[in-house]
């Protein structure tokens, strides 16, 4: 498989160069090549005009290239200073000299890092600054940031951009990977767009609009989750009442991950849950699936109380589950497709008869799923690991839909999936909805949420703090609510809304693209905060 | 390219064939490598390795050698299956050793106290052995599920504890008869005549009838793994615990069950010896079978069929090793070296082969789909 081909990028010194592309466009592969984690089959890399070749990340570090990964690589139980020194002991020792150097770098770039604090006491944004400092400590002059804003709330994003400008001013080159248009436009000096593994264009952030960027990123024929007629009925399918989960962390301090969460989904309704990752979405799903023990609350599906039942009984009662992390929760990667077709439904036909498995039945039905759901595979005996993300996801959806579910839980259904498969997955969710299923949709892609949902709830720190009608809200206002800034029922400014919808109607909607643009055009629109907490229902 | 439907079958079969070749490559290479290492060792001590192998091979093909190999292989097979059952769901029951020790002690005692007709007595003893082994192993299972204790640690410790338990119970007046025997070894009273398992007299000596039980266990293991819902849950848990849990497998219950079953199978390990040859349990009862079983399970890839071959191979080496010092000046220990190197090599080789296989299949599927994708893309553009 060719992940990257004919990529040409020129990054000037002392600039922030953004690298944009959809999930799976090949950004990560390119970065791995630049950082020496993977070798290119052909092509060259030049730094300051000098031809270089990396075979390990060590080579890249020696050349002054440093990488800040999306997932931080820090030891929680060590201090910032120890973390920075770890693995770089030869540079400035491990004592006072090293500490002084950390101070110096921190002051020079305005990072505000305190060397003696334990990393576990730091927030996400501070940890990220430690990661940046770690890289600078090793002498990096070229910094690669892989989706640095994915874990940050908007205020932290602004602070990060402030840091990046400081770095730039000191002559450090920053390569910034993102697929969020407004962020790229806010911080980048130059933009390169990657699509399907190749560079499709460069753009000047001063002149380009978010709309044009979105078109570049996904191509003009992009499918979008357009609105359609409502299929919502009056029949309540899922009822979740007063859900509460509190976990004790390593220190024994109790952290409430879900607090008094109540929601209803009716037949034919898609309920979207918006929220910055880590605000309790994963726990909500696991609580409904019976994978997490509840401290309080009830889960009722179609009049049947499932609160005390195990995961298998819940699945048999009619819950279909498209997990957020399909490798971890949805598939047996080393098992053939037909065995994966049994996973989660091994007690149901056609997978088993009584206590015995029915491999022939499962194989036959797997062939049907492969056919009906357009899973691109040479056969059903290949392992799940050999399929692409989109095809794995289609197999999972096919499997879950094959058992007449009453409720479908779709957590980030199009994450890491190519554009073509994305459209098919959206269509499948709509088909499910038309068939009278209740759908719980959790997504970080606000346009996906707005396009598919009949109703949206916003989760913030384990509580459902706001709700919105997708017909009357923009992604920007949803985003504000996701930071906890707005509560109750949110409704967007009519003008901004019309603009966002007009753009959506043109069918050029990108992940976050259009709605964000509307926000840039009409900045600081006030959010209506009606004062009825837990509105709706 | 042909149309997708007929293309599916042959491709699937090709993968299977390749998997078999890949699967065989690892153990064969490991055995060859260990032969080379042992040859070098023998050569360096001034002995002819081929002569040594010849001695082993000659005895191994003689009928008395073969009977011994099968008898020993039966015991090894049971030991390996006991370990493999847990391994299939990533449950590392290192305590097979202690489990069969406890089981043999209790069974020997009950066999010596009760005298029922054979058709009741023998099933009773087998059930006793399985219960004793299963309960002993369940201690580790309960500790893991309710207290989060790693089963590796707890089973190893239970091995040591089982030694002490045997020492405590196997004293005159409790499990051993009160006799003024001058013998150093202490043992239970002999089991009743009705407890003796049937055996077959052959030209090469007495063939233990217990191989029937081993075959039943093997067939049962294979069917349970591949044909039952429980087996699917077990394999799913072994492949990915998180996915299994999300799919509705009650992982805690699986741990308890598997640990108990693994221990129950371990309980059978001592039975061939107890019911067919020694008729008592004592300090001279064969030890170390549990650990041998783990090595054999690794070599046999935890598969009921693979273990047949690895158990026979180990039995062959152990039985013929005895002949080495008798028929030439060869150290018997060379066989232990051979077994050790085989296990080390095979663990490494399996992992390499597994990764290679996965990668190769990914590439193949990728290549296969590239053509389809290109065709599809053309269609999309045209449409």
Image (spheres, helix red, strand yellow):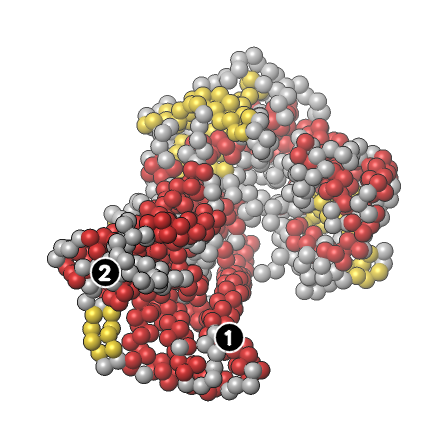
Residue at x 42%, y 37% (from the top left corner)? B146
Q: Position of residue A517 (x, y in %)?
A: 68, 32
> Which of the two residues, B96 or A310, is positioned nearer the viewer here?
B96
- Where residue B65 sits: x, y (%)? 32, 79
- Is residue B32 depicted above or below B99 in this figure? below
According to the image, label 2 marks what residue?
A: B190
* Disc ID at residue B34: 1
Q: In which quarter of the image is residue A55?
A: bottom right
The residue at the point 64 percent across, 36 percent down is A151
Earlier-in-chain disc, 1 versus 2: 1
Q: Is residue B374 visible?
A: yes
**Residue B316 in view (yes/no):** no
Q: Which chain carries label 2?
A: B
Chain letter for mark 1: B
Nearer the camera: disc 1 or disc 2: 2
- Vertical comparison of A219 with B222: above or below: above
How many angstroms separate mark 1 from mark 2 (CA)? Answer: 41 Å
Counting from the top left corner in percent of width and height, residue A134 is at: 76, 44
The residue nearer to you, when weighing B26 against A234, is B26
């Amino acid at each position: 498989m060719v992940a990257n081909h004919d990529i040409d990028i020129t990054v000037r010194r002392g600039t922030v160069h953004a690298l944009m592309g959809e999930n799976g466009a090949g950004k990560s592969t390119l970065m791995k090549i630049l950082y020496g984690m993977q070798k290119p089959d052909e092509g060259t890399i030049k730094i300051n005009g000098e031809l270089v070749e990396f075979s390990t990340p060590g080579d890249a570090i020696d050349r002054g290239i440093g990488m800040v990964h999306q997932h931080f690589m820090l030891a929680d139980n060590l201090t910032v200073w120890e973390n920075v020194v770890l693995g770089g002991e030869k540079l400035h020792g491990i004592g006072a000299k090293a500490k002084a150097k950390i101070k110096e770098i921190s002051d020079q770039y305005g990072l505000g890092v305190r060397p003696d604090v334990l990393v576990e006491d730091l927030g996400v944004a501070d940890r990220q600054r430690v990661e940046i400092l770690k890289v600078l400590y090793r002498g990096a002059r070229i910094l690669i940031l892989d989706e640095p804003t994915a874990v940050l709330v908007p205020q932290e994003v602004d602070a990060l951009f402030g840091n990046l400008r400081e770095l730039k001013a000191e002559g450090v080159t920053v390569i910034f990977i993102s697929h969020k248009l407004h962020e790229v436009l806010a911080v980048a000096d130059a933009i390169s767009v990657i699509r399907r593994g190749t560079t499709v264009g460069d753009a000047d952030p001063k002149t380009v609009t978010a709309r044009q960027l979105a078109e570049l990123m996904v191509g003009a024929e992009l499918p979008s989750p357009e609105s359609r007629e409502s299929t919502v009925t009056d029949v309540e399918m899922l009822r979740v009442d007063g859900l509460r989960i509190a976990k004790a962390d390593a220190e024994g301090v109790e952290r409430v991950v879900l607090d008094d969460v109540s929601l209803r989904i009716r037949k034919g309704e898609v309920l979207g849950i918006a929220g910055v990752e880590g605000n309790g979405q994963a726990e909500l799903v696991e609580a409904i699936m019976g994978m997490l023990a509840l401290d309080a609350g009830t889960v009722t599906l179609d009049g049947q109380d499932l609160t005390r039942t195990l995961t298998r009984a819940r699945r048999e009662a009619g819950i279909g589950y498209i997990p957020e992390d399909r490798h971890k929760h949805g598939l047996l990667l080393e098992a053939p497709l037909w065995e994966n077709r049994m996973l989660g439904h091994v007690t149901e036909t056609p997978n088993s008869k009584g206590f015995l498995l029915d491999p022939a039945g499962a194989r036959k039905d797997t062939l049907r799923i492969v056919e009906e759901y357009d899973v691109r595979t040479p056969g059903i005996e290949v392992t799940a690991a050999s399929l692409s993300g989109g095809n794995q996801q289609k197999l999972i959806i096919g499997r879950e839909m094959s058992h007449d579910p009453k409720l479908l839980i779709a957590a980030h259904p199009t994450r890491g999936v190519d554009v073509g498969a994305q459209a098919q997955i959206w269509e499948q969710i709509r088909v499910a909805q038309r068939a009278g299923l209740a759908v719980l949709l959790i997504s970080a892609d606000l346009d996906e949420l707005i396009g598919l949902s009949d109703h949206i709830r916003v989760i913030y720190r384990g509580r459902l703090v706001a709700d919105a009608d997708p017909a009357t809200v923009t992604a920007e206002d949803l985003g504000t609510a996701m930071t906890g800034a707005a509560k109750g029922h949110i409704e967007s400014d009519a003008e901004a809304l019309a603009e966002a919808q007009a753009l959506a109607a043109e069918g050029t909607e990108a992940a976050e693209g259009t709605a964000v643009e509307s926000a840039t055009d009409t900045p600081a629109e006030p959010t209506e905060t009606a004062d009825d907490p837990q509105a709706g229902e | 390219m042909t149309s997708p439907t007929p293309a599916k079958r042959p491709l699937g079969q090709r993968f299977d064939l390749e998997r078999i070749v890949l699967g065989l490559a690892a153990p064969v290479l490991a055995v060859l490598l260990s032969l080379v290492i042992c040859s070098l060792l023998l050569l360096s001590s001034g002995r002819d390795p081929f002569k040594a192998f010849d001695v082993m091979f000659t005895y191994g093909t003689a009928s008395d050698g073969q009977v011994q190999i099968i008898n020993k292989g039966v015991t090894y097979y049971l030991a390996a299956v006991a370990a493999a059952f847990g391994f299939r769901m990533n449950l590392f029951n290192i305590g097979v050793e202690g489990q069969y020790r406890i089981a043999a002690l209790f069974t020997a005692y009950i066999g010596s106290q009760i005298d029922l007709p054979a058709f009741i007595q023998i099933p009773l003893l087998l059930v006793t052995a399985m219960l004793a082994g299963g309960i002993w192993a369940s201690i580790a299972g309960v500790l893991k599920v309710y207290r989060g204790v790693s089963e590796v640690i707890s089973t190893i410790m239970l091995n040591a504890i089982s030694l002490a338990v045997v020492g405590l119970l196997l004293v005159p007046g409790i499990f051993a008869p009160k006799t003024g025997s001058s013998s150093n070894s202490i043992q239970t009273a002999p089991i009743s005549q009705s407890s003796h398992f049937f055996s077959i007299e052959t030209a090469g000596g007495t063939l233990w009838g217990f191989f029937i039980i081993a075959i039943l266990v093997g067939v049962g293991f294979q069917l349970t793994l591949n044909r039952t819902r429980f087996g699917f849950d077990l394999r799913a848990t072994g492949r990915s615990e998180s996915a299994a849990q999300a799919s509705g497998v009650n992982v805690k219950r699986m741990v308890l069950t598997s640990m108990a079953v693994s221990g129950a199978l371990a309980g059978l390990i001592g039975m061939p010896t107890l019911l067919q040859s020694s008729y008592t349990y004592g300090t001279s009862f064969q030890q170390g079978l549990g650990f041998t079983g783990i090595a054999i399970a690794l070599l046999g890839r935890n598969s009921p069929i693979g273990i047949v071959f690895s158990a026979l191979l180990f039995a062959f080496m152990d039985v013929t090793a005895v002949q080495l010092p008798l028929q030439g000046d060869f150290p018997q220990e060379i066989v232990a070296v051979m077994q050790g190197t085989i296990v080390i090599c095979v663990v490494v080789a399996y992992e390499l082969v597994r990764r290679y296989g996965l990668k190769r299949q990914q590439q193949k599927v990728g290549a296969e789909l590239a053509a389809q994708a290109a065709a599809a893309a053309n269609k999309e553009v045209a449409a």
